[in-house]
Amino acid sequence: MPREPARTRKTARQTVLPDARRKPRFAIGSVCTFARVPRIEELSPENAPPDWAIYGVPFDGGVTYRPGARFGPRAIREESQYIKRYSIEHDVDVCQALSIADAGDAAVSPFSCERSVGAQLDFARRIGDPDVTRLLALGGDHSIAYANIRVTWERTGKPRSGLPLVHFDSHLDTVDTVWDEKWSHASVFRRAIEEGYVDPSRMISIGIKGPLNTRDDLVFARDAGITVVTHERFRLEGQRLVRSFLRRIGSRSAYLSFDIDCIDPAFAPGTGTPVCGGFSSAEAIAIVRSLRGLNVVGADVVEMLPDRDVSGITALLASHIAMEVLALAAVRASVSTSARPRNSRRISR
Ligand SMILES: [Mn+2]
C-alpha cells in the first residue's frame, strides 16, 4: 500500500471540538459524547450532516456467557475523553478531514435479540443523511453488528454481492443456532451472510483462536469462503494476508467489525467471552492502521464489558480502536478530496 501523504482539505465541513485550553478534557458539558465530538443535534449547520455518526447500542441479550456489555457504550465514551484528533502515523487530522457527531444510544429491546435488531434498525436508519453519514456502532454484544451492517449495506446502494468485511474476533460468530435461537452474538455473520449483506468471499476474520466446541464450528466459514486468519496464522503470515485482502477488494466500500475479545485478556479483561492468548493493544492498533487505504463505510466496536474491566483499560482500548477506524476514513477523505471535487462526498458505491 503506497503511503501517500494525507493532505488535509481546506473547504470541507469539520468537527468543532471544545477548546481544551478553555474547557479542559475532563470537563463534560450536558452529556459525555465519544471523544468530545458534538452531539448530532448540536452540529453547526456548516458541519451537518456529519460524515460519521457514532452511536451506542446498550444491548447484551445475545450473549452465550457473561452479560454486562450493555454498559459498554457509556464506559467507552467515558474513557474516550482524552483521545486526540491528529494521527501521527497517518499524518491526518481526523476532525479536520471529517465531520463526526455522537448520535446517542439506540433504542433496544432487552428481552429479545430479534426485536432489538428491529429497534436498532429504526434508530440507525434515521441517523444523519443516508447518502452522506456513515455509522460506527459501539456495543453491546456482537449481535448489534447485524443491524449496523444492514443499514450500512442500504446506505451503500445495496450491493448485490454484499459488503466486503474485515472482522476482528476470537470467535467466528457463524454458528447457526444456539439453544434453538437464531439471533445471538454467535450467529451475527451467519445471518448477515444469509441475507446477502456481507460478501463471504470478501470477508477476512482476524485473530480467531480456540479451543472451539467442535471442529464443525469451522465448516460454515470455510465453505462460505471466509478467509480465516487464526491468531497463530496471523503471527506467521498476517501482514501478507491483509495486504492481499486489501488488493482484492480495492476501493470497494467495506465494513469493519471489531470484537474486543480478539485482544489478549491480559490487555483487555473487560469482555464477556474471554479467550487467552491474542493480540496486545499495540499489535491490534498496528493491524488496524495497516488497513490504510481501506474504504471503510461502516463499523462497530463490540463486546466491551465494564464490570470485568480493570482501571478502564478495555474501555480505553475500545475507544482508541474506534478512533483508529475513523482515522482510516479520514485518510480516504483527505486523499479523495485532493483528487476529486468537493461535492463528491457521497458514500462511494
Ligand atoms: Mn464476536
Image (tube, rainbow, N blue to C red):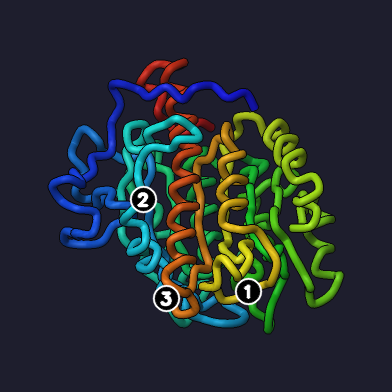
| Amino acid bearing label 1 | Pro
- Place of residue 81 in the rendered image (x, y in percent of width and height, measured from the top left): 31, 56
Given this view, does label 3 or label 1 mark the residue nearer the observer?
1
Marks 1 and 2, how far apart in space?
Answer: 26 Å
* Mark 2, other Cα within 10 Å: few <14 / some 14–19 / many ≥20: some
Q: Is residue 34 above or below residue 128?
A: below
| Amino acid bearing label 3 | Ser
Marks 3 and 1, how far apart in space?
Answer: 25 Å
Taking the image as shown, residue 62 lies to the left or right of residue 171, namely: left
Element at label 3: loop
The residue drawn where x is 55% and y is 67% is 268
Q: Is residue 226 visible?
A: no
- Place of residue 8 in the rendered image (x, y in percent of width and height, measured from the top left): 38, 24
- Place of residue 43 in the rendered image (x, y in percent of width and height, measured from the top left): 21, 44
When asked about the image quadrant of residue 231, the answer is bottom right
Q: Identify the residue position indicated by label 1 in the image.
A: 274
Q: Identify the residue position indicated by label 2 in the image.
A: 83
